[in-house]
Amino acid sequence: MGNYYLKNIVLKNSRISEEAVSWFFSLLNTGLLLIHLVLEALYINFECRFLSKINLFSIFIYIMLYFFLKRKKYRIFVIVIYLEVLVHSSLATVILGWPAGFQLWLLALSCAYFFPTLVFEEYINPEKLSWFLTGLSAATFFVLLFHSRFGSDALMSDIILSGEVYFYFHLFNCVVTYFVVMFFSAMFVKGMISTANKLSEYANFDNTTGLYNRNGLGEILKTRSFEGDEYSISIMDIDDFKSINDTYGHKAGDAALKYVGTLLNELIDEDRALCRWGGDEFLFVQTGKNSFEQLYDTLEKLRIEIENSNIVVGDTIFHITISAGVAKGDKNFDMDEALECADRVLYQSKANGKNCIKKLEG
């Protein structure tokens, strides 16, 4: 006699794993560190000494941010990055002038900030903060724009750049901005697709058993290509399920459902589709030649296995039995009549003392 122990297993989970969050932010931090290393080479080459010193501080910040990531301080990590980009791009724009293109970083900043705030919301909420900081970057952008029109072209009088040097800086900043927007847009679309898929799974799956629900089975029967016209159908339920809940509690009832769901999941193949029909009822569809006898034999073996097993929930040990009715369907795969037949046969199984599989050709 086997024992089935209730385990705290989350069958479906919409939360993004912490490994994915850590990977994403590590990649972001590494990319920004590389950008500033290239900037340092440009500043030194074009003798922008003041910006070179500022950039060394930025490089130090990104190195230190790895320690924040290791300690899972994601909200601090995002805010520090935001402020660094805001301050650095603003200073570089004021010092070198609008033609250098550092103001483009502020355009990419909104996209870059909204993505982690909305996708990784359990780590870096609240959303209002993203609106505030994005509004701040927009305000800064337009202040820099008016400064370029009414202020001096460059704050540091000792920095005199040729048109060619401005072109190199502008080209670099355009490339950075383009890839930042492209990267975050692609990641956002991927996140939306992933979320849609998870919502679809929730709509089609039963969380307790891991099986399809009614809606999910319906979708499978619409899209799946079954070979041949023959099929058989069964409705199965757990005997005296209400008594299990009343005697041992709903946790025991859930354990019974999970146990049956685990066994049924192992039976799924290209000729079989099944779902939790509702409550303690399960619907089983078998296709192909000899499906009627195959389905009956499968359920009889399942009945014996369940009868000879115990379910253990904490200090509580109990066992369950199942009953089922099996019926044949017609070649048009119209299940309504077959379902009614299977349901009637199920009640006959109950009337015969339960723990019984009965069959009737439809």
Image (cartoon, helix red, strand yellow):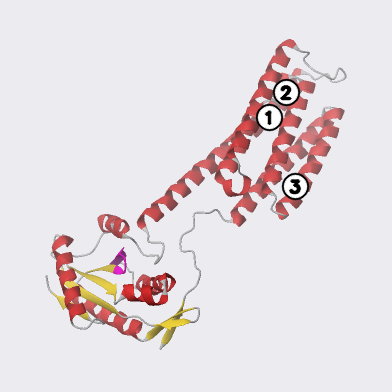
- 116 left or right of 328? right
Give the label on residue 173, or none: 1
Quadrant of the image occupied by residue 281: bottom left
Q: Residue furthest top?
A: 150
Check disc 2 and report the residue beneath it.
Answer: 100
Quadrant of the image occupied by residue 216: bottom left
Start-end of magenta stretch? 272-281
Residue 295 visible from this viewpoint:
no
- 326 left or right of 170? left
Circle 3: element type:
helix
Estimate the x, y position of residue 303 in percent, counting from the top left: 30, 81
Dominant secondary-structure state across the stretch colored magenta: strand
Tell me if label 1 and label 2 are in contact, CB under 8 Å. Answer: yes
Mark 3 residue type: Leu
Q: Residues within 10 Å of mark 3 (few under 14, many from 20)?
A: many
Relative vertical location of residue 181 with respect to residue 23 in this rendering, above or below: above
Mark 1 residue type: Asn
Circle 2: element type:
helix
Check disc 3 and report the residue beneath it.
Answer: 65
Depth check: give the residue in front, 199 or 219. 199
Mark 2 residue type: Ala
Residue 234 counted in the magenta span: no
Estimate the x, y position of residue 227 in percent, counting from the top left: 22, 64
> Depth-wise, is mark 3 or mark 1 nearer the camera?
3
Q: Residue at x 70, y 50 (%)?
A: 73
Estimate the x, y position of residue 278 in percent, counting from the top left: 30, 63
